[in-house]
Image (cartoon, rainbow, N blue to C red):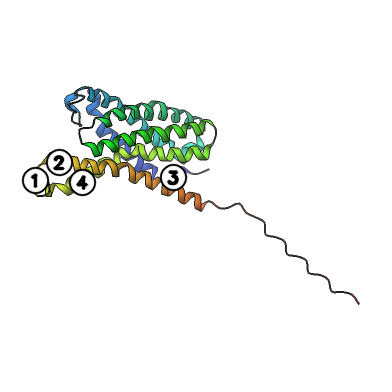
Amino acid sequence: MTRWWRRPWIVPLAAIVVLFVTFSLPPYLSFDPARSRVPQPPTLGVAHFWLLVPHVLFGSVALGTAVVQIWPWFRQRHPVAHRRIGRLYVFGGVLPAGVCALTIGAFTPYGPVTRASDVLLALLWLTVTTAGWRAGRRRRFGEHRRWMIRSFALTASIITNRIWGAVFVIGLTPRLDTTFHGDAGLLTWVASSAAAWLGWTVPLLLAEGWLERGRHRRPAAAVPAPRAAAEPEPARP
């Protein structure tokens, strides 16, 4: 059985998730649209906020439970709890958050490029998570593991999205008066579009690369070496 300290990455990962949720959640727990960190698109108005609230709440559940679910020590030591938390991850996290994300993404105030990314991300998130859950139900655990690693990559992409967003805003702001002719809204659109796509494609590609690497490194079944043919005895006179 894998010792928990042999997976040291779980500690910084859990810390990052806790910090992110602690920062992101409070404005939406107030149920005050004025505290939303996302501008309300004119087509939805305040309804956008009331879709954003459950998306953030259920998404936080998905993030928190995902950290526990990918921890090898926990899976091996507590299989029953792993299954129960897995149901919470799927039905109390990803599925409701993903359904809300479809509508939020379709009406994002950050332009058509971000809109295309957000809708595609929501569809993929729902699809791979459902595929992973179905594989687990059928006891195809190898398949289940691969789909759920993809699901985790998409779940965690909200964090990488924010990192990319900060990088692009910091990098592009000095060009506000030149490249963007003083249009801060255009700069925000460009930064948001780049962050939206890189936020989930990079983690998903890294997850796929890691899965493929693991597949190729898996040792082949040992095949016994063929016995050497017995040397013929010299003919007797």
- In front: mark 4 or mark 2? 2
Q: Residue at x 19, y 43 (%)?
A: 190
State which tag comes first along the sequence, 3 or 4.
Answer: 3
Q: Label 2, on which residue?
A: 186
Q: Is residue 184 above or below residue 133?
A: below
Residue at 53% x, 51% y is: 218
Three-letter amino acid code of the residue under disc 2: Leu
Identify residue for label 3.
5
Residue 168 numbered mark, or none: 4
Q: Check disc 1 and report the residue beneath it.
A: 181
Question: Could you tell me if the residues under marks 1 and 4 are in contact, i.e. CB atoms within 8 Å?
Answer: no
Q: Is residue 107 above or below residue 205?
A: above
- In three-dimensional space, the C-alpha distance between marks 2 and 3, rounded to whole angstroms, equals 47 Å
Residue 19 can be seen, yes or no: no
Secondary structure, mark 4, is helix
- Does dot 1 land on a helix, a strand or a loop? loop
Judge the density around disc 1: few (<14), some (14-19), many (≥20) Cα neighbours within 10 Å.
few
Viewer-side residue, 5 vs 173: 173
Q: What x and y, as percent, mark residue 23? A: 25, 34
Of mark 4 and mark 2, the one earlier in the sequence is 4
